[in-house]
Amino acid sequence: MRKALPGVAAAEPADPPDVTAATREQRTLVLSAFPAEADAVLAHTTLDRHPVVRANRRHFYLGTISGKKVIVAMTGIGLVNATQTAETAFARFTCDSSISVGAVVFSGVAGGGARLNIGDVTVPARWTLDHGATFQPVDPGMLAAARAVNVDLESVNYLGNPICLCKNAPRIRLIDLKRQPRLLVGGDGSSFDNNNGQAFPCIPNGGDVFGCQPCSAPDRSLLYTGNFFQAAGPWLRNALIGNLNIQPTANPAFDATDNETAAVQAVADAHGAPFLGIRGVSDGGGDPLRLPGFPFEFFFYRQIAADNAARVTAAFLHSWAGV
């Protein structure tokens, strides 16, 4: 049995009107870890007229992707942040409110295994939180729908929005992979982090990796500090040394290796919600520049990986007959 990660505070109280079956709706919760990933998802999202919902210092954005009603949110980096954000979503969006979480999708980047190259996208059939000692399968219906997805993936890597001081940064071409990235459905994924049970602190205005909000968030504010003041002290005391030991994210034993997916899956499973993880490969094989692995490949190729994961997410939601 997986242990719950500490520090999940109760969601801020909501005061919706009386909810009847006719006014209640289920939406798919679409999560990403850091701003570049969330911005790639928001690029496919048509926001509701009043899209912002706040709970437990976290921001959720209501909208539609490929005709499906969604709740989009950025978790922050690492297992603890992923768990806390997912738990907050289930606490805020319940069957007693007008909107509830009917399914969960994680869209982001990962280190790729032996079968994948940079820019490819993988949808593992099962995930592990303990380096492969045990696995949890994703929802079989969602996995079957992912197998039927037909989507053109981007082969050009762009700069993205690294400074994240404006919502619409110009697209600057970095490199063409000169091959067509592919989608691989099935196999294994693994999630880990080395934060010693601490929440990784975002950095206010810290760019499209370490920042506290998506660059394109409808309520983006230069004053928003996310979890920085709550998490920075404990993380510096208890996790900084572990983070100085940089570990490669690509692992040939797993098709995807990341820091959040399996933690979110554990929360979805606990709430009986179907789950699927979609990850674009940011570091691994097939690098035309032959950069020296993580973190160099991650910082150079994160944009194409995030973009392609979001493309698969949008195509999946279009074809999936679920929520």
Image (cartoon, grey):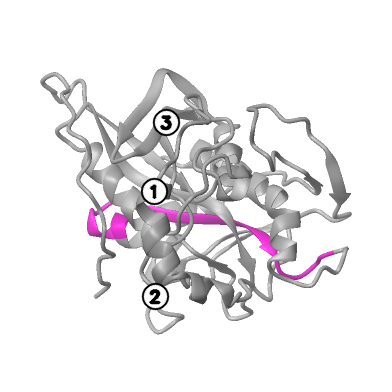
Q: Is residue 140 at all visible to an observer of this figure?
A: no
**How far across and how far down the image is residue 129, in percent?**
40, 73
CA–CA distance in space, label 1 to label 2:
35 Å
Q: Residue furthest left?
A: 18
Residue 75 position in % (x across, y down): 43, 48
Q: Secondary structure at mark 1?
A: helix
Q: Nearer the viewer, residue 156 or 296?
A: 296
Q: Tag on residue 135? A: 2
Kind of residue sitting beneath label 1: Phe
Residue indicated by mark 1: 229
Three-letter code for the amino acid on which mark 2 is drawn: Phe
Q: What residue is shown at x 68% (from left), y 76% (from top)?
A: 114
Q: Which residues are magenta?
A: 267-287
From the viewer's perspective, is the residue at label 3 or at label 1 nearer? 1
Q: Residues within 10 Å of mark 3 (few under 14, many from 20)?
A: many
Q: Label 3 belongs to which residue?
A: 61
Q: Quadrant of residue 321?
A: top left
Specify the farthest residue to the top.
Answer: 49
